[in-house]
Amino acid sequence: MSRAPVKPILVVHGGAGNIPDVKRPLYREGLEQALAAGWPVLEQGGSALDAVLAAVRVMEDLPQFNAGRGSALNREGYVEMDAGVMDGRTLDVGAVAAVSRVANPILLAYEVMVHSPHILLAGPGAESFAQARGIPLVHPDMLITEERRRRLQAWLREHGQEVGDTVGAVALDAEGHLAAATSTGGMMGKLPGRVGDSPLVGCGFYADDTLGACSTTGVGETIARALLAYRAVEALAEDTIPQEAAERAIRSLEERIPGGEAGLILLDRRGRVGVAWNTRRMGYGYRTPGCKVLHV
């Protein structure tokens, strides 16, 4: 039996953390571009899955975000990116971890979901799979910006921790299907080979048509331990208002794991939105028919 049509909605985030005042206009511009890429998909009757892929791909291409080009650098000075996507209709999942030569890891994650028997591929194996699927590899230097090099040098001097400005999107389409996608360059100065929450289902992303969809951002080690995305979505089973569920998930993280810093966007099956974070700032936006909201 087909579902009755619902009002579609797309929600995006550009990460939670210490976003400097001077960079807020750039973040806002990037979120606008992400909505402009993903919203027409839904407006024209396309799927939630295609909408989140389109939105996240745009943010991967923008150097102001920590995903794709402009990703944070590891301790040895190169990029290792993670991404994951989930289809709430089927519970299918695709993810990649520690890839260095793919411009759009979220598209490779989709290929893993659709064209492999696995849910997560990592490192050189994931890059070989990209070539097999016709996704061109790029030179790692193409993904590195001068600003990220400067920030790595500052990190090496001070060993301060940066909260990752991961990107993500969740969507509900006119058929009532949900999807979630998350992509990141990870934490500045991380050890080579480190994998955070973003490619881990239930941690960095989760989508289930019967409940809702979530994308998270922040310190991956704490988000993964808390299964943050799944816990936020699971709270919707009680018909909890998404904003309350989002805030509850962040409070639970703080209580169980002192020092845990994170943010999340949450969407329920009725198209209601929840957004919560415990960092200084979080950039997010959403679009529905006749309404657009942006916040940085």
Image: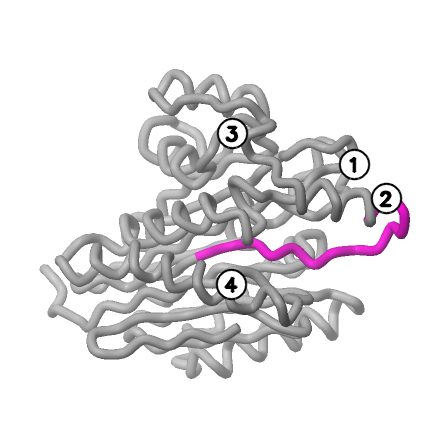
**Residue 222 at x, y percent in the picture:** 71, 58
Q: Nearer the viewer, mark 3 or mark 1?
A: 1
Residue drawn at x 48%, y 63% is: 13
Q: CA distance from mark 2 to mark 3?
A: 30 Å
Residue, disc 3: 121
Q: Earlier in the sequence, mark 2 or mark 4?
A: 4
Q: Position of residue 251 (x, y in %)?
A: 66, 77
The residues bearing labels 2 and 1 have C-alpha atoms spaced at a distance of: 8 Å
**Taking 265 as reference, is 192 above or below it?**
above
Tell me where residue 10 appears, x and y as whole percent.
Answer: 32, 65
Upstream in sequence: badge 3 or badge 1: 1
The reply, left or right, for residue 142 in relation to residue 209 is right
Find the distance from the CA under tag 4 to the CA under tag 1: 25 Å
- Which residue is more in the foreground, 187 or 216? 187
Whether residue 280 is in magenta: the answer is no
Amino acid carrying label 4: it is Tyr
Which numbered disc covers residue 156? 2
Label 4: element kind: helix
The range drawn in magenta is 155-168
Contact, mark 4 vs mark 1 (Cβ under 8 Å): no
Q: Residue at x 30, y 71 (%)?
A: 287
Residue at mark 4: 27
Which residue is denoted by mark 1 in the rendering? 75
